[in-house]
Image (tube, rainbow, N blue to C red):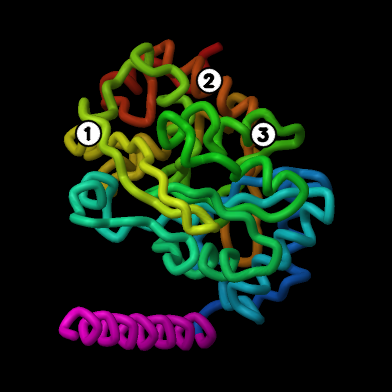
Amino acid sequence: MLEKTKSAIHAALEAWRRATSASHVRQSRPHVTRAVLTAGLARLGIAHGDTLFVHSSLKSLGYVEGGAVAVVHALQDAVGPQGTLLLPTYYLPGGTVRATCEMKDYVFDPRRHGTHMGRLPEAFLASDAIHRSIHPTHSVSAWGRHAACLTEAHHRAPSIFGMGSPWQRFIGCEQAKVLGLGISMGPVTFYHALEDAMGDAFPVPVWEDDVKLLACLDHAGRRWDVPVRPFDQAVAQRRIDHASRDDLRDYFAREFDAAGLRVNGQVGDAESWCIPAQAFYAHLHRLAIEHVTIYASAAQLAARPIGRA
């Protein structure tokens, strides 16, 4: 009874917070329509038939008429009926992979568990014709031509981002692009695909030693035990998405600009960017060989000038 009361209070506070935030944005930010968003995406080079992995910040776009649902529709308009959208719809009730692994009796159930990734992934997950991968911490959702193929059997992959995961399958798609919608180069989970693919050859030991088995149910209610290896928290403190790593985010932005791989532009009121996935992955691999990763120290960045061939 106490837990239900706490959940109800939390839900009410979250609803109040969102309403207050929406009111502030409506009064203080430019109003943006679905058509304006679609035009901005086209200027970034997004085209019909593209497969997009979308990392986003809804509030950065301005006041979107129609809210998150209008953004979902704009993304669908941009890639067309032959395109595909993927969004992270992770469910991390512990807040981190490590804390979620330590939760007693936790079982992920896609039929009742939503996502902690924000309003745009929430709206996407609630849309029609969405396929969601089965994974206890890093469930991904997709819409469009390749949605079923990209999300199937994630729970059978040997690691979160490894072979058989949505990330590795996404890299193999033609016209695959990573879209940063109103975000920096920091909060981009695509980076981790290289870590899992390289394994021990990756220059930084980013994972803890122990592999945990977390339970989840599939869409038919069958139970699966899925291997999950938490991030090493000490290493994660120096990662590109940590608040202290402005230097690393700036380096990666300028590096991918210098390499001619990143297209920058305005979508709504948000500075946004797009990078072809295969070229993104190949350049990350090249940087890793030179010991420049999303965990690099200031000294390592200084030792490799931006744009070095």
Q: Give the mark nearer the N terminus: 1 vs 3.
A: 1
How crowded is the residue under tag 3: few (<14 C-alpha within 10 Å), some, or many (20+)? Answer: many
- Quadrant of res 38: bottom right
Classified by dominant secondary structure, the portion drawn in magenta counts as helix
Q: Quadrant of the image for the N terminus?
A: bottom left
- Quadrant of res 45: top right
Q: CA distance from mark 1 to mark 3?
A: 29 Å
Q: Residue 307: which numbered mark, if any? A: 2
Q: Residue 232: which numbered mark, if any? A: 1
Which residue does the image show at 65% across and 81% down from the upper left? Answer: 65
* Position in image of residue 283 (x %, y %): 55, 21
Is 226 placed left or right of 80 in the picture? left
How crowded is the residue under tag 2: few (<14 C-alpha within 10 Å), some, or many (20+)? Answer: few
* Position in image of residue 94 (x %, y %): 25, 57
Q: 110 and 231: which one is in front?
A: 110
Q: Quadrant of the image for the C terminus?
A: top right
Is 235 placed left or right of 217 in the picture? left
Q: What segment carries the magenta color?
A: 1-27
Dot 2 amino acid type: Gly
